[in-house]
Image (tube, coloured by chain):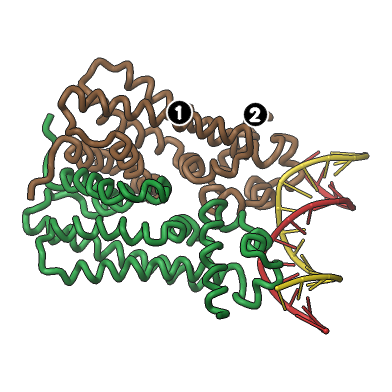
Chain colours: A green, B brown, C yellow, D red
Amino acid sequence: MNKSKKEIIKITAARLFRDRGYAATSMRDLAEAVNLKASSLYNHISGKEELLQEICFETAKRFLKVMEEVEGMEVSNIEKIETLIGLHIKTAMEDVTSITAFNDEWRHLSEPDLSKFVQLRKRYEQRFKAVLQTGIDQGVFQAVDTTVAMHTILSSLRWVYDWYQPERATSLPKIGDSITRMILGGLQNNIQK
Amino acid sequence: MNKSKKEIIKITAARLFRDRGYAATSMRDLAEAVNLKASSLYNHISGKEELLQEICFETAKRFLKVMEEVEGMEVSNIEKIETLIGLHIKTAMEDVTSITAFNDEWRHLSEPDLSKFVQLRKRYEQRFKAVLQTGIDQGVFQAVDTTVAMHTILSSLRWVYDWYQPERATSLPKIGDSITRMILGGLQNNIQK
DNA sequence: CCTACCGATCGGTAGG
DNA sequence: CCTACCGATCGGTAGG
């Protein structure tokens, strides 16, 4: 019961952090959005940063879980990247307010959480690059710089989260396919002038 | 002379807005960074938001100028997109601190500047899409959704600004080429399973 | 879960 | 360009 109220507060916080940013969201704004006085929030949470911390790390964990799933698949590396992109979008969309807060607001974490978070993200990126590198070694991708390719791929997905609106939900898989096709086309082929 | 001091304040503000965000940057932080007391800032600027406003609109104008240049070029649409991407990166890098503030902090503008800025950006995107559409009509790009393609392309460039560090500057054109090749490859080719 | 309140800090002004 | 200061708002606590 306490837990449920905390969940409501956290989800509402994620939405406010996305819409106004962490620093520009006051505890009074948040309290009003969940029909409480500011002081009452502290019966459910220890402070403002706890909310950001949990939003960031829970989202990170969801992405790492997808990565683990895909790494364990017995398919070609083309399909791995394809699946990674598709599941990345799908996972992001399951909690689209958290993902935008997660992408931009983590820098407001204080130590030691800040370092821990940066570390988590770095590990995720390493594993993404490893999948790309294997694809290159197998000759299914052209020999791009994996750092450039990784950043370009992950970055190219980010607009979907900001652009997403529930009424567009039906066309989401189609959009995911379009993006995947553009990126994979670029990984597999050289430019033809 | 006054102008020059204002420029210094603005450039410093852009850096702080990028590093900490607009809302989390105080006028006292900014004053300290330019060796003034907070109150002295107001001899050069009218207020905090003026700084953000000028950073956002000046950056927008620089991008629109590039768009105009490219639109007037007498080359194929493949080259137009290629040039657009290359110049976009080049233009962004010429003032890399402003670009990140411009990308993420414009939402803190108040009306009527907020609407004006959103309008400017929308027009830029329309023109980008028009270049893509012409390419599709000419049969040089596959028939992707231009909205998806436009967002994916512009979004895929964004990591470079965050990731950029001066000591990496020499390899920037090479990175620009890599990104361009990935994206153009994706626009021109269908996935080959 | 609320009222009442804390010290700190915010953007900005007055006056010189 | 500074000292001195304003009212407003911040995150959070005490006490019930």
Could you say which disc has been placed on residue A74 in the image?
none
| Image quadrant in which you'd find residue A120 | bottom left
Res B166 visible:
no
Could you say which disc has been placed on residue B3 in the image?
2
Q: Residue at x 37, y 25 (%)?
A: B67
- Residue B80, position in %: x, y? 26, 25
Q: Secondary structure at mark 2?
A: helix
Q: For marks 1 and 2, give the CA distance.
A: 20 Å
- Residue A151, position in %: x, y? 30, 52
Given the image, on which type of amino acid does mark 2 rest? Lys
Q: Label 2: few (<14), some or many (≥20) within 10 Å?
A: few
Q: Label 1: few (<14), some or many (≥20) within 10 Å?
A: few
First in sequence: mark 1 vs mark 2: 2
Given the image, on which type of amino acid does mark 1 rest? Arg
Left or right: B47 with respect to A94?
Answer: right
Q: Residue at x 47, y 42 (%)?
A: B103
Q: Residue at x 32, y 22 (%)?
A: B70
Q: Is residue B72 above or below residue D6?
A: above
| Mark 1 lies on residue | B62
Q: Is residue B105 above or below residue B88?
A: below
